[in-house]
Amino acid sequence: MKKISIIILQLVAIASVLGAQDIDLAGAFSDLSGSADSSAIPVPGAPEAVAVSETAQPKASYKWLVLVFLTGTNDLGILNYAAKDVNEMEKVGSTDKVAVVVEYNALTQNGGDLQFQRGAKTLFITKDNDINAINSTVIDPNQPGDMGSWKHLSIFARKNIARFKPEKVMLIVWNHGSGRLGIAFDDVSKNHMEVNQLGMALKQIGRRIDIFATDACLMQMASVVHELKDSADVILGSQEVIPGPGFPYDDLIGILDSNDSADGAASAFVDAYYAAYQNGKAGGYAIGNKKHTLSAIKAGKAASFSKDLSDWAEAAMAKEEDFATISSETYTESAFYFGSSGLAEAGLRSVDLVDYLSSVKDRIKDESLKEKTEKAISSAKGMIINSKAGNGTNKQGLNYNAHTNGVSIYLPLLRYNANNYEKMSFTKDTKWDDFLRKLLSRRGN
């Protein structure tokens, strides 16, 4: 999820009308959800009018196609973050080398009234100087409205890859993210994509995605990377909550326009994202807490990483004395955790994997297990193309740029959510879920 820094009373009322999902707002609206009279739910109006630009039209082919699946059918649309990011794209627009195409649907406000489109519309992003209105070309006006549908995402990508015939594709899913619990929460349809469904969407596209990115919170997890490893070359995302402004899209378009390499472009964008928030780029990026992370992962190395981590987990479970140390709250709870207050209670606990393994490595007595620990750490680091984090501190008082390494993992304190976690291929292909079960059983949970 993108972090919302200010809760507006009017939005609380809106959230209760729509029954906003607790997970979307990190619990902020959970007590109010569904409490309003259902007759107050707004009736869908006509699709929002969007001007058709005559200044640029799609070409036959491009070096890069950037596809942004922008789910603004929730508080992010109401707070205008969705429209702002489209306008940020329009600062640059599509270029001779880079076509930018957005599947756009958003809740908006007109005065005190809540409005939403019947369906999504597909925009070919063109350059303009109006930061308050979306003026890009509408190339598909009446697409399915459910932005939480993995099939909608897949169809959007397939259709536009066929239309624009790019050499390389970057696909971005924009919205609230909740790590292992999924992404793209649509508060109108009440639908979202679980991680296994996100994997299904990418597999149905019919070609590998050069860069797959999530402009959404907490998504750069080992289980997510493993799910997508056969469908993308580079996986770009944040271990931490993403601030409201999200990605600096004007920087992204410029980077792709001057870079033909997926690895190189993703690495450069990690640097640009870091600079935007660390240096206070104009446009809302001047956040004070500096709690920002972004990493680019080489998906081709994910399979060997998963095997090395699974081997470590299996060996750790077999060494009772060392397992007692590894599973101790002294070490599990001192490793670097992500998410603001309340996220742990929502089941969103994720820990920096390398930070956790490094904290227990020197306390392991069995030499063979220590070697497997070092191998798992090396394998995790070996996936990372680039990782940058701010100089703020988390709720434990730990520094981001000293303790984060680019990939997170599920490490619950009290309960293991089997229903969600075991839908993912990570639990079928590794022993991490068995490790968690034994760890929690040892604690009596």
Image (tube, rainbow, N blue to C red):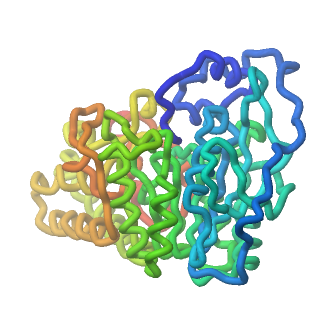
The image position of residue 224, as x and y in percent, is 49, 59
For residue 123, above or below residue 107: below
Question: On the picture, is 297 further left or further right than 389?
Answer: right
For residue 207, above or below residue 254: below
Residue 313 falls in image quadrant:
bottom left
Q: Nearer the viewer, residue 356 or 440?
A: 356
For residue 153, above or below residue 330: below
Question: On the picture, is 141 further left or further right than 181?
Answer: right
Tell me what residue is drawn at x 23 percent, y 69 percent. Answer: 378
Could one spot residue 439 in this view of the protein? no
Tell me what residue is drawn at x 79 percent, y 52 percent. Answer: 51
Could one spot residue 242 in this view of the protein? yes
Q: Nearer the viewer, residue 329 or 19?
A: 19
Tell me what residue is drawn at x 51 percent, y 43 percent. Answer: 417
Residue 106 falls in image quadrant:
top right
The image position of residue 186, as x and y in percent, is 70, 42
